[in-house]
Each structure stands twice: as C-alpha cells, then as structure tokens.
Image (tube, grey):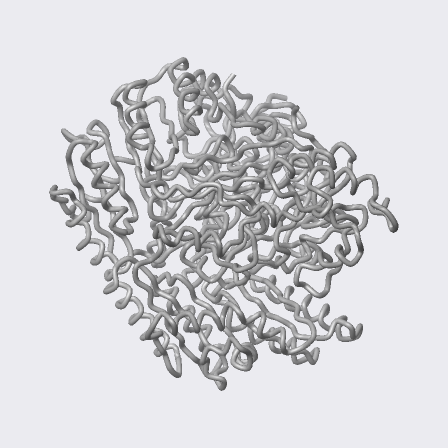
Amino acid sequence: MRLLYSMTAPSPLARDLAAIVGAKHVREALAARVTYAMDGLPTHRRVPDLVVLPGTREELIAVVRLLAALDVPFVPRGAGTGLSGGALAGEGTVLIVLTRLNRIVRIDRANRLAVVEPGVVNAKLTAATKPLGLHYAPDPSSQTACTIGGNVAENAGGPHCLKYGVTANHILALEVLLADGSLVELGSPGGETWGPDLVGVFVGSEGNFGVATRITVRLTPVPRAVRTLLADFTSIRTAGEGVSAIIAAGIVPAALEMMDQSCIRAVEDSVYAAGYPRDAAAVLLVEIDGRNADAVVAEADAVADLLRTAGARTVRTAASEAERERLWQGRKKAFGAMGRLSRDLVVQDAVVPRSALPDVLETIYGIAQRYGLVVSNVFHAGDGNLHPNISFDATDPALKQRVEAASAEIMSTCIAAGGTITGEHGVGLDKLRYMPLIFDAESLGAMQALRRVFDPEERVNPGKVVPVHACREWASLARAS
Amino acid sequence: MTILEKVTALLGEGAVLEAGTDRVPRFAPGSPDAVALLLGTAHQEGWRVRIEGAGTWLQSDAPADLALTTRRLDRIPAIEPPDLTATAEAGIGLDQLRQQLADRGAWLGIDPPGLAGRTLGSVVATASAGPLRHGFGPIKDHLLGVTFVTGDGRMVQSGGRVMKNVAGYDLTRLQAGGFGAFGVIVLVHLRLRTLPRADVTYLLEGAREDLTQVGEDVAAAGLTPAALELVSPALARRDRWVLGVRLAGSPALVAADEAGLGAASGGGRFTPLRAEEAHAFWMRLAEGFAVRPVTFRIGGVPSASDELLDLLQHQLGDEWISASPAAGSIRWTGEASIDRLQRLRRTLAGLEVPLTLERAPWPLRSAVGHFGAYREGVGPLVTGLRRTFDPGAALVVATEGE
C-alpha cells in the first residue's frame, strides 16, 4: 500500500487537505500521528498515514470528496475511546478526526430533540439541555470525553441504558456523508422513517457506512425523583441472584451495575474512592428514578427488600446528591482506577442472558486463575453486559499471549451461555476473530453485502467488523445511481 | 410441471394450501429451511412470490406466481421469563403468543393495529406499532434479533437473544419495517417485560383541541402512561373525540400516575374503565384499522400533531384516526384515491413528515407504494438494498410507488 505522507516535506495530499482545513489541522509528523495510534485498547496499535481535523461540515464534505476523487481510504474518528480498535487507521489510510465539529446546532425543547454535529461531547450535550429539564440519556462511562458521532457509530450504551435504551433508541435522524462524497438524509425529526429504517441500520455500523455530519437526537426529561442504593454481597453468585430478583419482580431500575472485589479495591485505592466496602465480594449500584417521589421511594424499598432476601449483607441509600455523585463517580471512573493496577488494561465487552451471570462470572474467574491473570469485573448487570478487564503488561510478549488466550476463552464462555461478543464497544479489529463464532458464513456475507450498498468500494474504515475471509460470497451490487 | 407440482414435490403435500379466489397457488412451508428452499427455487425459476401471514392485515391480492404463507411457522422455541426474552417463529398469531407469555408471567409491550390473530412476522415486517408505542417505543425496540430468508433463498441471522448486542451490522432493523422487500422473516427474538401488576385505562371525551391540550398537560406533568391516544369519534364509536390513557406497571407507579391524571385533565373528568371494557376499547381500536380499505401512518414532531390532524381531515376527510400526539405518530384509515394519497405524501414530505402506506388494495398500493417521497440520497440506497437482498426481484412488494 502506498504511503500518503512524506518524510521530509508536506506530501501532495497533505497540501491539498491543508488547503481545505488549514495547515495546522493536518498532522503529518510521526510524533503527531502517533497520538492517534490507539483507542484505549493496548492490544491494537496502528499509526495513520495522515490525520486531518476538519472544523466545519463544509470542510468535512470537501475532505471526503477529495479522498473519493483520489480513491484514498479513510477512517472517521471521534474522541478515540471505543476500546475495540475500530477507530484506528493504518498505512495508506487517512484518519478524519471529528472533534472540531462540536457545535450544538439546535435544541428544540417543545419536541424534546437536539441537532448536533458529530464531535459534540456526550456530557456537554446533557449539560446544555439540563437547564431545560432535559438530558441525553445514553451515558457511556467515557461520557466526559466520547462524542455523539462516536456513540452513533458504536451504538454506545451506558449504565442508564437499562431503563432508557441504547444510542439507537435515541437517534431520530441523520445526515450522512457517504464514501463517494454524496449526502443522504436518513430518518425524520418525528422518528418515522422514509422507507426502511436506515437510521437503525446506520447506528452501530462502526463508521463503516459513512460519516454522520448532523445528528438529531431525542432528549429525555430529567427525572424528578432519584433514589440510589448500594448493596454489598459476600459472594458474586448472590449478587447475581439479586439482579435476577429485581428483574423478575418487574422493576426496571434506571441503572443496575455490579463491581467485583478487585474493582472495588482498585476504586477505593484511587482518588475516586466512593466508600464501597473493601471486603465485599461484589457491590450492586441500583438507581430508581421517576416523576413521583413517593412511587420512587416505594420501588426503591421493594428493591432493597429483594436484595436483602437475595443475600445482601447491607443495603445503603445515598442520603444526599453529593453521596449519590460519589457512588457514581466510583463506578464511572472504575476503568481509570483499574489502570493503576498495572501498565495496561484490556477492557472486554460481552453480553450473556441475565440468568447466566452467576455461572459465567465463576467460569471467568476460573479462566483468570488458570492463566495467572488479574480480572476485574465492572459491568451493566441489569443488561447482562459484562466487562471483564484484564490487567497486564503489554511489553511482556508471553503475558500478552496469555491475555489473548484468556480473552478468547472468556468470549467462548459467553457465547456458549447464549450470549454475544460485544454489547456496546463494537467489533472493530479486536473482535473480528470471534465473529465466525456467532454468525455463519451466509450471515457474515449478508453484512458485508449491506456495507457495500453504502460503500461499494469499501473505502471507509476498511478491514473492520466483518472478517471477509469468513464470508460466503454475495454478488456485489452497488447503489443505483 | 406446473408450479403446484414442482413445489409439492419440493415441500410435500402438507405445504399445499387451497388457492384463493385469484387462483394463485398457495404454500405454507413448515420450517425456516423449507422457506429457504422454496425461495431459492423461486429465484432460480423466475417465479414471483407473494408473502402472506395470517391474511388478516395486508390484502392478499398482489399479482404473483405463488403465495408463501408463514402460518405453519407457528412454534415458540423459547420463553425465558428470568431473562425476559422469547424466541418465536414468524407465523405465530399475536393472540397465541400473548397467551403463552402471560402464562409464564411475561408480556410483550406492543399492541399493533389489526385482528388479534395477526402474525408476529407481519407486525415486525411492517413495523406497525399501536398506542403502546407511547410508553414502550416502536416495534424495533422490542426486537433482539431476527432470522430471515432473502429473495434468493439465503438464510441470514441477525442480532441475538441478549439485551444488548452490537456484533456486526444491524440487519434486524433493516427487516423491521421493510415490508418484506428485503427478505421473509422466519424467526424473531423478542425483548419482554414482566406482566404489569397494575394495568388501568381512563377515557376522557371532548373537543379535539381540548383533549390535545390535556395530552400535553399529561406529558408536561411528567406522567408516564403506557398509552396516550387520541381517537376520532368514528373510530371510538362515540359522539366526540376520546383521549385514552393506559397506565401499566408496578402498583406504586400506576397509583402515582392515577393521582396525577386528575390534575392534568383540564377540568374534565377521566372515566376509569373496568378491565373488560378497557380490553374491548383497545381491541376495537386495533381492529378498526383492519376493516377499511386503506390504512397509513405518518410521523411528525409532537408540536405538529394538531396541524397534521387538520391536514388529514382537510385532505381526506374526518375518517377513522388515532393519534399519539406526544409520540408524533398518527394512523388514518378509510377510503382514499391514488391521486389524493400521492398529493398528501408530497405535502407531508415538505413538512419533513414521512407517510407509510400500511395496507391498501394492490392497484393503489402499487401506484402509491409503501414508501415514497424519499429524502436526498435515500432512493438509491433502497434500490441497492432491494438488489442485494432480492437480486431476482422474486418478492412482490410495492416498495415505492410507480
């Protein structure tokens, strides 16, 4: 593959891109490009040939049209917090970083929607809408950094998605720039579709179908009453049974999160210490919200009873907003806290049926023990969305190999339990090898054929999501012009 | 050999049904593999295939060489109450599915238009949600995955059986609302809820404008009804418009919303319905959309609901209408000409409001299309999808108008 940059002077492509976005928004020097070589996952690293940061929609369109004219592949990237290797661009590929497209175009309070550019940071959207009594519900742990465009690409989740749904449930319409530089308008502000649900098809396509240039999101009223509970358990199994008891009772908490002892201790040893009991085998963080304070208290009391019956040692209710924030800070910064355990951290992402949680967790700890690894679990228990995280030193090749092998066994365990390989981080590069374990060749071929409808030449984010070698052949049918 | 003889040899006599009045041979494959076999053969032979479910929703009148009905795909391979998931074949009637779920304490939070026996596959393929869309979202929000067979007989799985899943591209959402243009759904993985422990319905009658205001007040008060539906007098069989409010969930939440309802009623008085009255009210509403010749839905922003209702009444007359103002969705049924529907779709497109034709006799359906008046760039994508998932154009679906 050809190199797009020059070792000594600006390459012709860099010069052309600079003419569109300005020279300071094109990164050609290796030191600058290395910044974009990872997305938080230490097992995958690719240095892009060129990095370009358009600052307006028009600049973005001009950049993509230039790359289309030159037949150059590109990868769109938000904040680079995806943890699947999905937003990495390698040799011969231009990385388009969208963080400068960070304007909130419009907030429509009456219709509870907002129109934003892809680089708007998730938490900033909620900050802007909260004074109006509204918020953007999907809240990934990285929400202070990750962008709405990235959330759309990955169909991101978050703790409160148990009640409010994932990104796909909150996207009404999209303006999308395809690889050939053409614009398409998908969906409508009211949420009804023009034909098939192409918004639903695009969300979660991991940046492989095009670039979302304008995103219309649904806003949700800020709940008037909130109750946050912390329950601690002396075994992982009873904590898992507590989760099942809540779900079986028909109560839908806003969030239902679990952390194991390794995670609890990492948090308590960090600046994010939340007051979790260090000797607990697991804690559950449960949040009930709603309009009516009495009803919320009644549901929270019911949850507390269920957890005690399931075997919780203590159930504590946050007595103030400050205490609630502290409990949540521990959860949301858990990944950062775990980063202190060792040089590197592999954040895994898998989903299992909720009732399988206790068995699967026990199996995962067994795998970790066999490979001599430290696994910390912090995850969305209410959804069955596991994040078994492995602490290690990636500079040790033998250790890295053990991590890879353990990760594969963990994935196989989740699949065998009726689960899947990713619930919110996406396939990217990291999970490519597992795709044939859950989809047959025909289904993988169908996915690849779907991608070609949007991007016939496969120039956007090539080589991600679908392992092409495992696909059954489908006729390549380009879009009608 | 005739088509009847060939397919009988392929699938066995058990798959052969009596032809309808149009004499098109009808087949009911007994398994997803049999569907794949039939469609693969149809693709090779160049046969055009009409897809049917229970035959209670979309008119069975599309011109075709054969009809494929999913009605023998009526098994429920799995109901998992602890996980709140179920897997059901596409030909199961919703009434049967609901009953089996209820027996296990589980509930599917959808109430689509149509008769009680309408098939699950039909509901998913047309993405036709009912009043419960207000509280529990559109059909796609209840889907965890589907298995479908393409127009050339390929069996494709999408999604899975767990609550969250972003492995691979989302072909499930392509099928939900695709009207069968991109394949025949054979198996559906569903997200369930526990059977609501409290489920009550209140009605308020009045002038449309007043009820619209009450609906807005209910939303502004932060109440969380499962359904908040404005129903025209003809459809409700009442003298005036009716606002139906359904509260479903835990007793504590329902009691709290009941208390808030009175304050939001604008001086009117909501009438509580007994359980059997409530059931009859919502069933009548659903069935009402299956008896008139033409039914369509439109979706705008909530603040445009009044204007859109005015537009419908002005352009098509005050027929049978049901609207979920807070969700911005409106369903209309009655009699309408091709010209009027095409004009209405164009007018609505100018307001950024899509019109989806849900059911109509074939001549009207083929002229107007289920979809149309696409936004920029959508048409070529839909054409590409059709060519990809039904390369021989075997599936007779009026995707777009002529």
Q: Position of residue B356 (x, y in %)?
A: 43, 28
Name the residue nearer the viewer: A185 or B277.
A185
Judged from this view, the residue extending furthest toward the right is: A8
Q: Relative to B198, is A46 on the left or the right?
A: right
Q: Position of residue A462 (x, y in %)?
A: 73, 45
Q: Position of residue A76 (x, y in %)?
A: 66, 46
Q: Quadrant of residue A69?
A: top right
> Number of labelled discs?
0
Q: Relative to A35, is B321 on the left or the right?
A: left
Q: Position of residue A146 (x, y in %)?
A: 56, 56
As displayed, is residue B19 above or below residue A391? above
Q: Quadrant of residue A42?
A: bottom right
Name the residue rendered at 63%, 78% in the picture: A341
The N terminus of chain B appears in which quarter of the rendering?
top right
Name the residue rendered at 37%, 61% in the picture: A252
Name the residue rendered at 29%, 51% in the picture: B224
Q: Quadrant of residue A182?
A: top right
Judged from this view, the residue extending furthest toward the bottom is: A279
Q: Relative to A148, is A4 on the left or the right?
A: right
As displayed, is residue B302 above or below residue A431? above
As displayed, is residue B30 above or below residue B289? below
